[in-house]
Amino acid sequence: MSKSSNWESTIKPIVVLSVISLIASLLLALVNGMTAPVIAENTKRTTLAAYVGVLPSVSDASELEEVTDYTTAGITGVVKAPDGSTAIKEFCDGFPKAEVLNEALCNARVEDIEALNVPKILGVSVVDGKWSILKEYVEGKTLQQLMDENPDKLEEYMEGMVDLHLLIHKQACPLLNKLKEKTIRALKSVEQLDDSTRYELMTRLDGMPKHTKLCHGDFNPTNIIVGDDGKWYVIDWVHASQGNASADVARTYLLLSLKDRKRAELYMDLFCEKTGTEKRYVQGWLPVVAAAQLAYKRPEEKELLESWINVFEYQ
């Protein structure tokens, strides 16, 4: 077969098909680039229109203001009403309905505690096919934002955070779930724990003092809003329970450690200093709390949490 016939029968069709595919891809990318913003804008308009139905003070979607600086995981959107008093927190598609309703229930049970500033739940709705919580909106910045913006004030902010945590622990909320029972369920659900480790963790948990103090369960700088009015507000009570305060402190220590070990140590030292608590006692909770945290199956946390699951380290 000649080179000419080989070109015509084999190579040329491949080259032609490749060129056609390239041109088609470029055209598709061009069309997508032109239509994507339009689709996104239409989707946004539809969603905002759906919000109007559940915000009593709003009559038109154009009155709503989008909030973009929220930090809560699992949230796809937040908007607030023109009077600034209400906002909607929209959860991702497929987000468990039970978790949304549980957050609303836990929030409702703690929001009437006079000593704490907790934005009130105003309603729970399905907006544009997504579960959403309607609640009071607080103007301000999260403590995390302030810490990042003003590193020179870290110790001042951390001291305020510890004082707020201590205030929470002074409260009682008898209708909340027991922390010990929640922890037992979590430990039983963690697949990577072998039977021996699980038994040791359960034994340690059972030997810890039984308290009924209010525990936030996810107390970290992203869940504290320093309001423009000067008040400190606590949000995201979905993991709230009643139990041993040191377990709650150990969880906060772990959450801080995931981002900044230095801040975690500062927090732990301030807590122990202010309460006269032995640091080893709080550390004794770390293996149990770390193992329970594994139940959330977050890959970015796995390595650090597993490093804390040593039930003999703080004997």
Image (cartoon, rainbow, N blue to C red):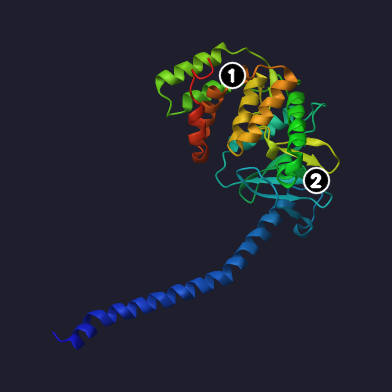
The answer to whether residue 3 is above or below residue 315 is below
Q: Relative to residue 263, is residue 20 drawn left or right?
A: left
Tell me which numbered mark, 1 or 2, is placed earlier along the sequence.
Answer: 2
Closer-to-camera residue (138/253): 253
The answer to whether residue 139 is above or below residue 167 is below
Image coordinates for residue 99, horizontal then vertical, percent: 60, 35
Q: For the residues marked 1 and 2, what is the alpha-carbon distance in whole angstroms?
A: 35 Å
- Place residue 239 in its image quadrant: top right
Q: Can I make out residue 239 in this image?
A: no
Q: Amino acid at mark 2?
A: Glu
Q: Relative to residue 100, is residue 140 drawn left or right?
A: right
**Residue located at (60% from left, 18% from top):** 280
Assign a secondary structure to mark 1: helix
Residue denoted by label 2: 139
Q: Amino acid at mark 1?
A: Lys
**Residue located at (53% from left, 34% from top):** 296
Closer-to-camera residue (245/68): 245
Residue denoted by label 1: 180
Closer-to-camera residue (38/234): 234
**Residue located at (54% from left, 30% from top):** 293
Q: Can I make out residue 100 in this image?
A: yes
Could you classify mark 2 by the number of other residues whose Cα lies within 10 Å: few (under 14), some (14-19), or many (20 or more)? few
- Name the disc covering residue 114, or none: none
Image coordinates for residue 246, horizontal then vertical, percent: 65, 20
- Place residue 120 in its image quadrant: top right
* Residue farthest along the left direction in this orientation: 1
